[in-house]
């Protein structure tokens, strides 16, 4: 699904403001393959030099394509108490993930599916947890259909 939102008219704000506004669109940093370009973390040529089969290089670089089975029901999950109890650590970790290119956002709109976040805090470690258990989304991979809310999708 492609989501685009038009930036504000040029006469309303500066070029820098327009760029900041555009950056908060879900597809702003995508390449022609629909991948979030800042999130690509492999060097294809290095894998090829190591003799990695081309199919594996492609899988690592582009991921696996799944087909959505039907239209998922809208879902806006609420975050767990562990997030509310650790707001500063949560904000810092989300900033780290966004600046590293692993996440996009914050967005100007609420996506159709919003999964709840939780946090695991142990001594000096902090981890965000995405809970997708309640998602009622099925995808097709080859001839098999899997629910994204039922754990890892076996490939």
Image (cartoon, rainbow, N blue to C red):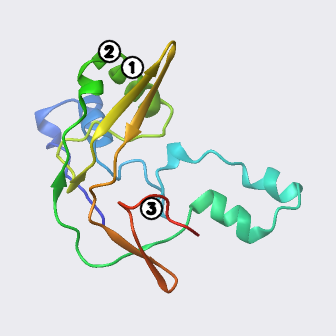
Q: Residue at x 31, y 18 (%)?
A: 86
Identify the residue under disc 2: 88
Q: Earlier in the sequence, mark 2 or mark 3?
A: 3
- Packing grade of label 3 (10 A; few <14, some 14-19, many >=20) is few
In the image, taking residue 60 as reference, residue 149 lies left or right, namely left
Q: Position of residue 147 (x, y in %)?
A: 37, 68
In the image, taking residue 115 as reference, residue 98 lies left or right, namely right
Do the residues under discs 1 and 2 have CB atoms within 8 angstroms?
Answer: yes
Identify the residue under disc 3: 34
Observer-side mark, 3 or 1, equals 1
Q: Secondary structure at mark 3?
A: loop
Identify the residue under disc 1: 92
Q: Earlier in the sequence, mark 3 or mark 1?
A: 3
Above or below, 53 relative to 107: below
Mark-to-mark CA distance, 2 and 3: 32 Å
Q: Residue at x 29, y 33 (%)?
A: 20
Do the residues under discs 3 and 1 have CB atoms within 8 angstroms?
Answer: no
Q: Position of residue 80 (x, y in %)?
A: 25, 33
Q: Residue at x 17, y 45 (%)?
A: 109
Q: Secondary structure at mark 2?
A: helix
**Where on the picture, by quarter, is residue 48?**
bottom right
């Amino acid at each position: 699904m492609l989501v685009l939102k038009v930036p504000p008219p040029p006469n309303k704000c500066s070029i820098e403001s327009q760029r900041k506004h555009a950056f908060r669109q879900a597809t702003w940093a995508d390449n022609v393959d629909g991948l979030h370009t800042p999130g690509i973390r492999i060097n294809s040529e290095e894998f090829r030099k190591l003799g990695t089969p081309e199919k594996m290089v492609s899988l690592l670089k582009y991921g696996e394509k799944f087909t959505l089975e039907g239209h998922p029901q809208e879902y806006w999950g609420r975050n767990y108490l562990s997030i509310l109890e650790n707001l500063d650590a949560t904000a810092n970790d989300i900033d780290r993930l966004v600046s590293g290119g692993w996440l996009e956002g914050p967005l100007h709109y609420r996506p159709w599916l919003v999964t709840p976040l939780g946090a695991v805090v142990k001594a000096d470690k902090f981890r965000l947890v995405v809970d997708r258990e309640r998602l009622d989304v099925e995808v097709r991979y080859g001839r098999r259909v899997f629910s994204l809310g039922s754990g890892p999708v076996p490939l």
